[in-house]
Amino acid sequence: MGLAENQLCFDLIQEWVVNNPKASICTVEGAENFQDTAIFQDYHGLPEFRQAVARFMEKVRGDRVTFDPNRIVMSGGATGAHEMLAFCLADPGDAFLVPTPYYPGFDRDLRWRTGVQLFPVVCKSCNDFKVTTKALEEAYEKAQQSNIKIKGLLINNPSNPLGTLLDKDTLRDIVTFINSKNIHLVCDEIYAATVFDQPRFISVSEIVEDMIECNKDLIHIVYSLSKDLGFPGFRVGIEA
């Protein structure tokens, strides 16, 4: 009950693997590609794979946005992507704001080895745990009073554990907030395709396309194949 493993597509994937033996270097048909794969590769990930990932992320978001493969970095799962971002964006003792309730795995992903703190943005059940500008400002001010340097805001959309979606106005308020503070936004969209048609999932990538004054270098999207495709064991993480 503690695992988010989607096993509904295993039979489809197995059939595809059988019908496409050249896709794997572990088959006779794919063995000729072994040498190309065994040598040093681009540290950001195989270019062909990054292109495929970019296209898949676009498709998941209804082709309403585009992703530049050259701005995608591959990692060992979303866990690795989060930890990498924490190492890159903050120093030990610095903090990321995170709306409550939040995925408890974030404590492991961002804190254990980096020394980075997670500072709660208190969201309340009376308004369905909506992330408001007021709550963000209060948390930021409280951190400042405690001499804690805030380097970013971490959000999870669709939400784990709430299963809710952030609407367009809320996302716009969040992007406006992080720009006003000149801090980073890490948006975990690992469940982007595991949603109903209504309400429609809106990616932060759609929001920043319409915000001319937004500093896109402050926006980071974390994705993975573990939830939407049910491949947690593949350890494929994506930071865009």
Image: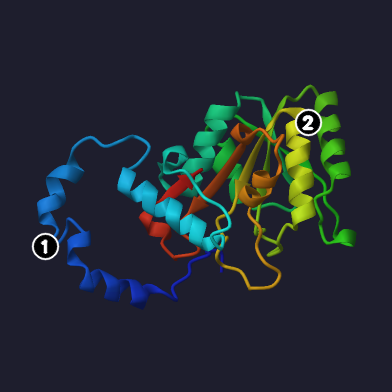
Disc marking residue 180: 2
Amino acid marked by disc 1? Glu
Q: Classify the position of the N terminus by image quarter.
A: bottom right
In the image, is 59 to the left or to the right of 51?
Answer: right
Q: Are marks 2 and 1 in contact (CB under 8 Å)?
A: no
Q: Is residue 167 above or below residue 92?
A: below
- Can you say whether 51 is above or below 225 in the image? above
Q: Residues within 10 Å of mark 1 (few under 14, many from 20)?
A: few
Using the rendered view, name the quadrant where residue 70 is placed.
Answer: top left
Estimate the x, y position of residue 81 in percent, counting from the top left.
Answer: 49, 42
Q: Is residue 177 left or right of residue 31?
A: right
Q: Residues within 10 Å of mark 2 (few under 14, many from 20)?
A: few
Q: Give whichever of 220, 80 is nearer the camera.
A: 220
Q: Nearer the viewer, residue 57 or 15?
A: 57
How far apart are labels 2 and 1 at the CA level? 54 Å
Which amino acid lies under the numbered mark 2 shown in the image of this protein?
Ser
Task: Give the image quarter of residue 45.
Answer: top left
Label 1: element kind: loop
Where is residue 4 shown, x and y percent of the image?
53, 65
x 69%, y 73%: residue: 198
Residue 114 visible, this orientation = no
Which residue is labeled 1 in the image?
A: 29
- The residue at 38%/49% (across/down) is 51
Residue 68 % position (x, y): 47, 43
Question: Which badge, 2 or 1, is on the more N-terminal residue?
Answer: 1
**Residue 209: image x %, image y %?**
64, 45
Asked which secondary structure carries label 2, the reply is helix
Q: Answer whether residue 20 is visible to the viewer in this image.
A: yes
Viewer-closest of 142 and 239:
239
Residue 61, by quadrant, is bottom right
Q: Nearest the camera: 216 or 34? A: 216
- Which residue is drawn at the image coordinates 85% and 43% (left, top)? 133
